[in-house]
Image (spheres, rainbow, N blue to C red):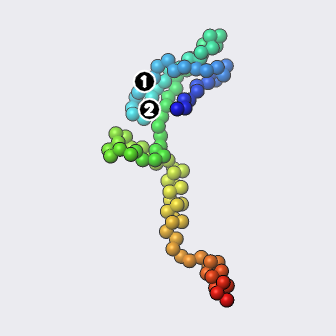
């Protein structure tokens, strides 16, 4: 399991999350502090889930996010190439040359 390492922007030491509050299922407010005793900086920030990269496997998920724009473009590109049933001219020429 990987964990995200928070780094203090003031001294580059590690930070710890003091507390966090869930505002919605996709948004959390967080408060963190630097573990370097000489620095001691404190910060507030947030964690947001914006897009879905793959659908949930459960039947009725509690939250459904929009698909990421890059994922939508990738799927559209795959669908365009998959429906191409037109024969390629170069393949046809190769087949004619092989029979001669």
Distance Cα–Cα, label 1 vs label 2: 9 Å
Q: Report x, y in % for residue 25.
A: 39, 33
Q: Secondary structure at mark 1?
A: strand
State whether residue 61 is above or below residue 11: below
Q: Report x, y in % for residue 41.
A: 60, 16
Q: Report x, y in % for residue 33.
A: 56, 17
Residue at screen point 59% across, 17% down: 34
The residue nearer to you, when weighing 56 against 97, is 97
Say which quarter of the image contains residue 81.
bottom right
Quarter of the image that includes the C terminus: bottom right
Farthest residue, direction front: 99
Q: Which residue is mark 1?
A: 21
Say which quarter of the image contains residue 4.
top right
Image side of residue 2 versus residue 36, left or right: left
Q: Residues within 10 Å of mark 1 (few under 14, many from 20)?
A: few
The residue nearer to you, when weighing 99 against 16, is 99
The residue nearer to you, when weighing 98 against 72, is 98
Q: Report x, y in % for residue 63.
A: 37, 40
State whether residue 56 is above or below residue 93: above
The label number, if any, that marks residue 27 in the structure image: 2
Farthest residue, direction top: 38
């Amino acid at each position: 399991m990987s964990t995200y390492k928070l780094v203090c922007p003031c001294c580059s030491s590690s930070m710890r999350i003091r507390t966090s509050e869930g505002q919605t299922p996709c948004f959390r407010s967080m408060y963190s502090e630097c573990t370097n005793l000489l620095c001691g900086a404190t910060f507030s920030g947030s964690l947001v889930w914006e897009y879905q990269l793959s659908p949930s496997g459960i039947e009725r998920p509690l939250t459904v996010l929009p698909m990421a724009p890059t994922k939508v473009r990738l799927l559209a590109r795959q669908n365009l190439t998959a429906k191409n049933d037109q024969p390629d001219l170069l393949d046809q020429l190769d087949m004619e040359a092989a029979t001669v």
